[in-house]
Amino acid sequence: MVTTRHYGMDWLRIGAFALLILYHIGMYFVPWGWHVKTPHPMDWVQIPMMATNSWRLPLLFLVSGYASAALFAKLGGAGAFLRSRSARLLIPLAFGIIVVIPVQPWIELATQHGYAHGFGYFWGDDYFRFGTLDGIVLPTWQHLWFVVYLFAYTLLAVAALVLVPERARTKIADGAARLLGGWGLLIAPLAIWLAILFAFPGYRETHALVDDGPNHLHYLVPFFIGWLLRERPVLFESVARCWPAAAALAVAAYGYIVWAMWSAPDEGPAPAGIVTIFMVVRLVQGWATIVALIGIADRFANRDHPRRAMLAEAVFPFYIVHQTIIVVVGWWLLQGQVAALPAFLILVAATVGGCWAFYLGGRRIDWLRPLIGLQRRA
């Protein structure tokens, strides 16, 4: 384990969460189900959305695995690591579920299910029902499912750190590093993803934690590869070797995805139990893009900047609040029947401004800091 900070991975984490925010803004316009929708969804928006659809979440788990390994190395013990992750993840999760999230399902119910009551009534009488309302589970963690899953994977990591002897862990890490050496970093994880796809064809993710087994397998691969990148930084040599080819493969795979979507724009998902070429190519594009982005971050972005620390700190507060801002502003735009281009510009400006206000305001108040995912001041 090295102690040198890899600034490229910091920038990759910052960029990944920024991209997630832009993706969720796009969900207002694309003809896919979401919490609030423009009255006239646009089919062509699917094309840029699919450019990131297969890798944005696995990339988040990979950089989170890397950051988790770095925190464990800093704290030096499984107990301290678990206490730190519990405070940094569970407190903002509870705050988000109780305070930040509720307006999202209310808007979805009001705009898509005919719910007639105001938000105050909804929050006081319906939100904490611990059941369903028109098929929507309440209370809900909405986009904060990522935090729930990250904490679950943290518990798995802690269990491995406690139950597996250090010598055995070292052998496992060394063996995994050998497997991922050279071109293995590009080939082996993709092979695992494809094996999961063929073992569970037609599976649809639920984000409900307890019934999402294949999805957990899919995300655990990048999480523990991210952890291993921190423990065995020699793997960055493998990244350096194969990222240009991975980038070319990712572009070619995305080209096929664009062609397939334009050729059959009305074709829905495949029947359950069927694996299509499109599904396979989508996974190829996803993992190849991740390898390419790690390589780009390692080659061109492994350097510090005066704003890096603040941006890295702001990532989690931005994540907590961004979707609520998008849904609320989207609801106002829907009521005003605002056209697509000004609606997009308003959503970008309002989301960026609201996230900065949430972060900069919360970081100044000591008791608010843990609620928005920040450490208390020393």
Image: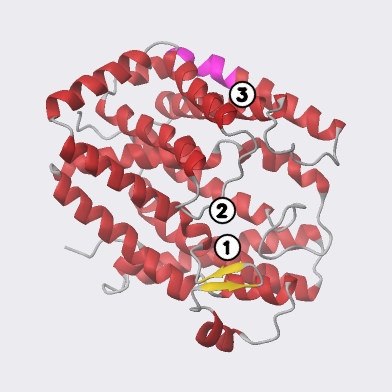
The amino acid sitting under disc 1 is Thr
Per the image, label 2 sits on a secondary structure element best described as: helix
The amino acid sitting under disc 2 is Ile
Vertical side of 140 occupied by 170: above or below: above
Q: Main secondary structure of the magenta part?
A: helix
Highlighted magenta segment, given as a residue range? 240-248
Give the quarter of the image for residue 217.
Answer: top left
372 drawn magenta: no
Query: How much space separates mark 1 and mark 3, taking CA atoms?
Result: 30 Å
Query: How much space separates mark 2 and mark 1, taking CA atoms?
Result: 8 Å
Quadrant where the N terminus sits is top left
**Where residue 360 is drawn, which disc sits there?**
none
Q: Residue at x 59, y 84 (%)?
A: 119
Horizontal relation, residue 92 to residue 35: left or right = left
- What is the x, y in percent for residue 142? 53, 62
Q: Which residue was labeled with disc 3?
A: 250
Asked whether the residues under the numbered discs 1 and 3 touch, taking CB atoms below 8 Å apart as contact, a structural biologist would say no
Q: Callout 2: 10 Å neighbours few (<14), some, many (20+)?
A: some
Q: Residue at x 50, y 55 (%)?
A: 208
Q: Which residue was labeled with disc 1?
A: 351
- What is the x, y in percent for residue 102? 53, 74
Q: Which residue was labeled with disc 2?
A: 21
Q: Is residue 73 visible?
A: no
Query: How much space separates mark 3 and mark 2, taking CA atoms?
Result: 22 Å
Marked residue nearer the N-terminal end (2 or 1): 2
Asked whether the residues under the numbered discs 2 and 1 touch, taking CB atoms below 8 Å apart as contact, a structural biologist would say yes
Per the image, label 3 sits on a secondary structure element best described as: helix
